[in-house]
Image (cartoon, rainbow, N blue to C red):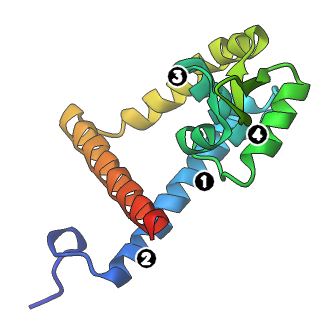
Amino acid sequence: MGKEPFLHRALTQDDLRLVMIPVRRLAERLGTLGEREALSETGLAVAEWRIIFVLARDGAGHLQQLAHRASVDRRQVGRYVERLERRGLVGKRTDPTDRRRTVVEATDVGMAVYRELRPKYEALADEFRSLYSDYEYGLLMQLIERAILRADMLLARDEEE
């Protein structure tokens, strides 16, 4: 009898390390597509676009919240925000309730860039979406969200220790 198919057996710690490889490969390729198809003429990095996206979608936030929401390295988020601020795409202000924290928000120019780029990213998403039936796509999204929630739980547990 041959080996069980990968998806029909419990994942071991070794498997989990291997799962990260194709996930990273997909994320990198989608980022490259986004740079080529949507960002090529803007001079924005993918991480900068994600920051503008979450600010436009969710509203202002602190740097650490922004790093988490935009999936940007928290050690790099300040650098990206500085670049976006120099271009007039975001504004920063001191949080009136905690003067040690910085609040970042999209400017009118940043919102205009968001409105311009959003359809291009939606077209890329539609292209990716066309690979799957409605059922498959729904299941894929559920599985991805479950994995993200688990990773968040593990990260929160590690931060508590």
Q: Is 161 placed above or below 137 here?
A: below
Q: Position of residue 90 (x, y in %)?
A: 77, 22
Give the residue at mark 3.
Answer: 58
Quadrant of the image containing the N terminus: bottom left
Q: Residue 42 versus residue 160: which sits nearer the camera? A: 160
Within 10 Å of disc 2 (Cα), the crowding (few <14, some 14-19, many 20+) is few
* Residue found 75% across the figure and 51% down from its top: 76
Give the residue at mark 4.
Answer: 45
Position of residue 68 in the picture relative to residue 110 (left or right)? left
Spatial CA span between label 2 and label 3: 32 Å
Give the residue at mark 1.
Answer: 28
Q: Position of residue 16 (x, y in %)?
A: 37, 74
Which amino acid lies under the numbered mark 2 shown in the image of this protein? Arg
Do residues under tags 3 and 1 come within 8 Å of each other at their CB atoms? no
Mark whose residue sits in front, 3 or 4: 3
User: Which label is found at residue 17?
Assistant: 2
Which amino acid lies under the numbered mark 3 shown in the image of this protein? Asp
Say which element carries label 2: helix
Mark whose residue sits in front, 4 or 1: 4
Say which element carries label 1: helix
Which amino acid lies under the numbered mark 4 shown in the image of this protein? Ala
Upstream in sequence: badge 3 or badge 4? 4
Upstream in sequence: badge 1 or badge 2? 2
Do residues under tags 1 and 2 come within 8 Å of each other at their CB atoms? no
Residue 9 figure quarter: bottom left
